[in-house]
Image (cartoon, helix red, strand yellow):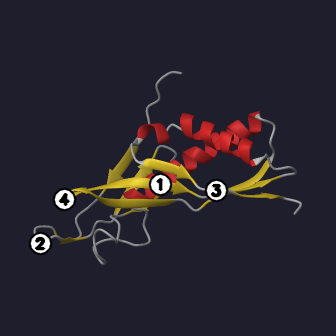
Amino acid sequence: MKNHLYTADVHWELDGEFPRGKYSRKHVWRFDGGVDVPASSSHLVVPLPWSDKAAVDPEEALIASISSCHMLTFLDIARRAKHKIVSYSDKAEGIMEEIAPKRMAVTKVTLNPEIVFEDQAPSQEELDALHHEAHEICFIANSVKCEITVAPDIVRVASQ
């Protein structure tokens, strides 16, 4: 596989008193497809009003990226195994904690997928194998060093 280059433009402008630390952390992420995403520091890290709770923060984006990559990889692997999936939802969670004095990191991500199959769901053993393979080849999972766990699935068949 050849190398791929991905880009993101991040833009911030001063709104507030920079020297006193009383300035907005709101900014914009711009992606090559033309999408602008409101972004900010997490309100859990920088208190309101200097952050924007409604915007995406880097920690949420990391969790969403891990979840999205796992899902896309899982869908492709399941398709190749002849499974028919109607929907896939995930309520992913990430834990950020102090790893050393003044050093924080996302140390664990838990994916909680709910998958609806069109007719017959795979056995738990096959489902576990599909998730394991998806995790092993997920681009984002291979790019981060925190623990990533796939919690037990909620699996349904559409006709039920």
Is residue 59 shown left or right of residue 90? left
Mark 4 touching mark 2, by CB under 8 A? Answer: no
Q: Give above or below for 156 relative to 20.
A: above
Tell me which numbered mark, 3 or 4, is placed earlier along the sequence.
Answer: 4
Q: Distance between the residues labelled 1 and 3?
A: 14 Å
Q: What residue type is labelled 2?
A: Arg
Q: Name the residue under label 1.
A: 109
Q: How far apart are marks 4 and 1 (CA)?
A: 21 Å
State the residue in front, 94 or 36: 94
Tell me which numbered mark, 1 or 2, is placed earlier along the sequence.
Answer: 2
Tell me which numbered mark, 1 or 3, is placed earlier along the sequence.
Answer: 1
User: Dot 2 surroundings within 10 Å: few (below 14), some, or many (20 or more)?
Assistant: few
- SS type, badge 2: loop
Is residue 58 shown left or right of residue 160? left
Q: Residue furthest left?
A: 19
Q: Distance between the residues labelled 3 and 2?
A: 47 Å
Q: Give above or below for 103 relative to 54.
A: above
Tell me which numbered mark, 4 or 1, is placed earlier along the sequence.
Answer: 4
Q: Mark 4 points at which residue?
A: 102
**Residue in view at x 69 percent, y 43 percent:** 75
Q: Give above or below for 5 relative to 155.
A: above
Is residue 160 shown left or right of residue 113? right
Q: What residue type is labelled 3?
A: Pro
Q: How far apart are marks 1 and 2 (CA)?
A: 34 Å
Tag of residue 152: 3
Mark 1 touching mark 2, by CB under 8 A? Answer: no
Between circles 4 and 2, the one closer to the viewer is 4
